[in-house]
Amino acid sequence: MKDMISDMAKSTVISIGMAMTIFCLAGIIFDIGYKGNFSLENYGFTKMVIGCVLVGLGFGIPTIVYRKENLPIPIRVLIHMGIGCVVYTIVAYAVGWIGGSATIGQGIIIAVIQLAVAFLIWFLFMRYYRAEAKKINDKIQAMK
């Protein structure tokens, strides 16, 4: 139980850190795109930072599903990414990352990009952990 909580906390901290990093990079891109005239009003920045934390929680906490060995990997991925993407989409509309002056077509493009980024990050973590497992298995085989 203690390991599960520790793993969940670690995943959540990593997820929040990644959400904050992506938020900062997007902010830099928008600031450059608007030639230094990018501004936020009515606590917009604070709302977006809180949104980043919520997105981090939305992707970090569901990683606990990977401890369920009796579930097939595709189901675990679907649960994890499904919860994370739903939380992201709700937060994105609430803080103004999606919607507002965007057309329906732009909203769809933004949603597709968000899903692509989420799955890219998941894929990179999957490859990393597979490589780690392979190293561990190779060391175990070498010890025999």
Image: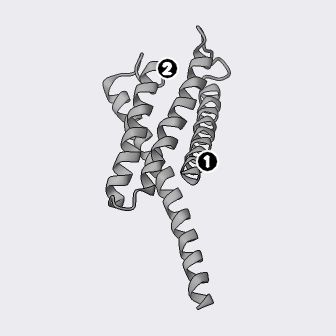
Q: Which residue is the extreme one toward the bottom?
A: 144
Amino acid at circle 1: Lys
Q: Which residue is the extreme one toward the front?
A: 1
Q: Position of residue 75 (x, y in %)?
A: 32, 54
List the residue tagged with mark 2: 95
Q: Residue at x 58, y 83 (%)?
A: 140
Q: Quadrant of residue 114?
A: top left
Q: Position of residue 136 (x, y in %)?
A: 59, 75
Looking at the image, tell me whether mark 1 or mark 2 is earlier in sequence order: 1
Q: Residue at x 60, y 25 (%)?
A: 49
Residue 10, labelled with which disc?
1
The residue lying toward the viewer, choosing from 95 and 59, is 59
Q: CA distance from mark 1 to mark 2?
A: 26 Å
Q: Tell us which disc is closer to us: 1 or 2.
A: 1
Which quadrant of the rendered structure holds the C terminus? bottom right
Amino acid at circle 2: Val
